[in-house]
Amino acid sequence: MSGTATDPRSPGSGPDAVDCVLDRCTRETGAYAGALYVLSPDGQVLQLAVLSGISRRIASPWARVPLQAASPVSDAVRQGALVWIGSQEELARRYPQLALVLPHPFAMVAAPISTGARTWGGLVLHWSSAHPDALSPQERALITDACRRLGPMLRRAADSGRVLAGPEPRILSPARKRAAGPAEAQAAADFAERLPSGCCALDPDGRITFLTTAAAELLGAGIPDLLGARPWEALAWLDNPVAEDRYRAAVLSRRPTSFTARRPPDQWLSFHLYPDASGISVRIVPTSSADAVLPPRLLHPAPAAEPGRATALYHLMHLAATLTEAVGVQDVVDRVADQVLPAFGAQALALMAAEEGRLRIIGFHGYSAALMDRFDAVPLTSDTPAVHVLTTGVPSFFGTFGDLRTAYPPAVLQDDMAAWAFLPLITSGRPVGSLVLAYDRPRAFPAEERAVLTSTAGLIAQALDRARLYDATQQLSHDLQAGLLPRTLPRVPGLDVAARYLPAGYGMDVGGDFYDLIRLDETTVAATIGDVQGHNVQAATLMGQVRTAVHASAGAPPGEVLARTNRLLTDLDAGLFTSCLYADLDLVGHSACLATAGHPPPVLRRPDGRTEILKLPPGLLLGIDPAADYPTMDVPLPPGAVLVLYTDGLVEAPGTDIEDAITALAGRLAHERNQSMDALADTLITHAQHTAPRSDDVALLLISPHVVGLQLSPARRVGPPRPPRTPGPS
C-alpha cells in the first residue's frame, strides 16, 4: 500500500515503522534481502507487503502465497515456528517446486509474526550461500526480536482498518556504502572509460543503468538503445536462458558468477557479474571461445551459452507441466523417462515403491525386464542404496562404481553402468519410493545438478503418489463394476439378445452405466438400461443399488418399477441422479410396455427395415422427487424387429446435437440389416469409437424376438404377479 502515511494516533504502527524494523533486521543479521508478508483478513493468503534487496520482478511469483501452500513462509505461519533452509539441497528436498524455479545457492529463514494466539504474517530473510549451515544464536535473537516488534504493529494496523499490503509491495531502497556527487560521478565514468574491455551496471531489476563506450561497441548497440533496458531483451543474441539465469543466480546467491555468449557471427564474449545490494557490475571481455578460462575470483562460473543447460531446463519445466496431467503409474513412468533421461543425460531409470515391507519396481526404462526381476521386492531391511535413500530421505550420488563399492562393499556391477543417482521420492514428509538414474560414463554430479535432481524427484514423488491412488481407485471401481454388471444374460427361447459395455475415454474409464435382462416367466422378459451420474466408486456403487432395486421390482408394471426405484434413491440421498429405461416384453403378444426416467429414447427397427425413435412419455430422473410419476407406452414388437436400448455415451459427441446423433443412430440401424445381434452390436460400438472421442461410458442392449414354439409349462416367476396391462399411454 505504497503512499499510506503513518497514523499519528498510533505511533510506531504505520508503514514507515514497519519498514524500519524490516530494514534494521536485514542489516543486523547480514541478510541481503528481506520480505514481510501480511495475512489476509480471511486468513487464507499471505500477501507480500514489503520487499528489500530483490527486485519486484523476481519476487512476483510469490507475491501471494496461499496459506495451505507448501512454502517456507506459509509453513512457518501455519505451524507457528521458524523454518530454516540452509542449503540448496535442503530446499530441493523440502520444497521441490520452489527449488526447481530457483536453482541457485542461497540460505533463508521464514518466521511467524504473532501476538498471543493470533498470527498476523511472516518474515523472510535471505543470505548468500556462504552463510553457515545453521543460524547463529545472535541471528535467531535478532529475528525473534523483529517479529516481536512487528506483531503489535500488524495487529494495530488490522484493528484500525489500515491495509499494510497493497496491490504491489513497497520496495525499500538499497543501502549504499557511499553517495557520490556530480563531479565524482563524472570522474567514475571517466575511470570506467579508461579501463580495457567494457563494463556496465545493472540495477536490481536487471536494467542497464550505466555502460562504457567499449561495452556498447562489444555488444553491437548504441548507448541510448541499451540504457534502461535488460540486456537479454535489448539484444536478440542474448535472449537465451543462460543470460537471465546468471543474472538471477548473482542476485539470489550474492556471489560472483559468469557466462559466455556468442555475438553473431563469431565474436565470443565473456560476462563477469559482481553483485551487491544496489545491483550488479558486469565486466565484458572478448574471448576466443566458449571454453575460455575464467578468473579465479568467480566462485560460481556458469557453463557456456550452449544447448545443454537450456535443454535441461526445458525438459524439467515440461516435466513439471506434464506430470500434472499424468493419471496412472505407467503414465508417470513414461513421462519421467521422456523428460528426465534426456535432461540429465542418463541412459536408464527405475521407479520403486514401498509395498508391504519390500521395495517393488513399478516402472523402468533402459533396463531389461530380467535385470529388474532380480532387484524387485527387495526387503526394506536390506543394505542397498535404493532402500537407504527411501528410509533416510537423503539422496546418494555415486560418480563411479568405485564410489558405490566404497559405500556398499557387497555391491556387484550388474547393469553395465558407470554412475548412479539414488533419489528418495518423498511427499508431505512421507516416503513413497525411490528413483534410480544410471549413466554409462562416470559423472561428477556438481552441487547444482544434485539440487535439481533432488527437486525433480520431489515432483515425481507427488505425481507418483497421485497416480498410485488413481490406479487403486480405478481398480476398486472396475472390480465393483464387474461384480455388479451381469456376467451373462439369460437365454430366453424366442429372443435374440446382445449386450456391450465400453468404458469411457482416457482418464474417465469408470462409470455408472448398467443394463440387465430379467426372465419373468416363459413368455415375459424385462429389460432395463440406465446411467448413474458420475465416473467414480460412488457412481459404480449406486449403479449396483439401482440395478438391484429394479431387479427386485421386476414383474410390476414398468411405471411402478421406476417409481419404487426412485423412492429408494431419494431415501438414500446419494446426491447423484440416474436415468433409467425399463421395458416389459410380451413374447406371446409380440409387444412391449416401456417407461423412462429421463433416459435417451430407444430405437425400434421394424421387420421391414424402417426405424423409429420411440418418443416415450417423459419421466423425471430417479433420485429427485419421491412422488414422481412414470407413465408407460405400449409398442408392437413383432418377430424380426430389433429394439435398441443404449446410454448417452453411444450418441453424445462434442459439437454434435444429441437429437441429430440419435437420428443418425436410427439411420445406421436401418442400413445394417441381415446381421446377427452380436455383429450388429459390434458395428454400432465400433462406429461410436471411430466417430469422435468419447467422454462417457457406453452401454448397449439389443433385443430381437423371433418365432419359436414356446413351451408354456409352469416356470418360476420373479417378482409379484403382473396386473393386467393398460393399452396405450397411461
Image (spheres, helix red, strand yellow):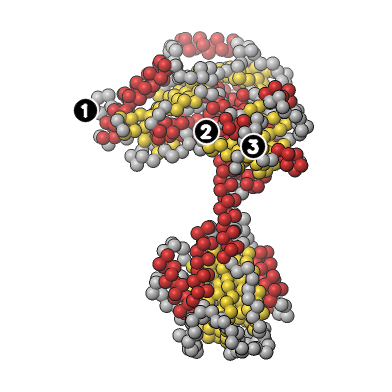
Residue farthest along the left direction in this orientation: 9
Dot 3: within a 10 Å radius of its alpha carbon, few (fewer than 14), some, or many (20 or more) residues? some
Dot 1: within a 10 Å radius of its alpha carbon, few (fewer than 14), some, or many (20 or more) residues? few
Q: Residue 95, percent across and down?
A: 52, 33
The residue depicted at 55 percent of the width and 82 percent of the height is: 717
Q: As displayed, is residue 135 above or below residue 432?
A: above
> Is disc 1 in contact with disc 2, using a CB cutoff of under 8 Å?
no
Would residue 615 be seen by someone viewing this image from the given angle?
no
Q: Quadrant of residue 516?
A: bottom right
Query: Is 328 situated left or right of 49 in this image?
Result: right
**What amino acid type should be assigned to the residue bearing mark 3?**
Pro
**What amino acid type should be assigned to the residue bearing mark 1?**
Arg
Q: As displayed, is residue 40 above or below residue 5?
A: below
The residue depicted at 39 percent of the width and 72 percent of the height is: 626
Q: Which residue is mark 1?
A: 9
Q: Which residue is mark 2?
A: 95
Foreground tag (1 vs 2): 2
Q: Label 1 vs label 2: CA separation?
A: 42 Å
Foreground tag (1 vs 3): 3
Dot 2: within a 10 Å radius of its alpha carbon, few (fewer than 14), some, or many (20 or more) residues? many
Q: Quadrant of residue 177?
A: top left
Residue farthest along the right direction in this orientation: 416
Would residue 84 be seen by someone viewing this image from the given angle?
yes
> Is disc 2 in contact with disc 3, using a CB cutoff of under 8 Å?
no
> Is disc 1 in contact with disc 3, using a CB cutoff of under 8 Å?
no
Q: Residue 225, percent across and down?
A: 56, 27
Q: Earlier in the sequence, mark 2 or mark 3?
A: 2
Q: Which residue is mark 3?
A: 379
The residue depicted at 56 percent of the width and 58 percent of the height is: 477
**What amino acid type should be assigned to the residue bearing mark 2?**
Tyr
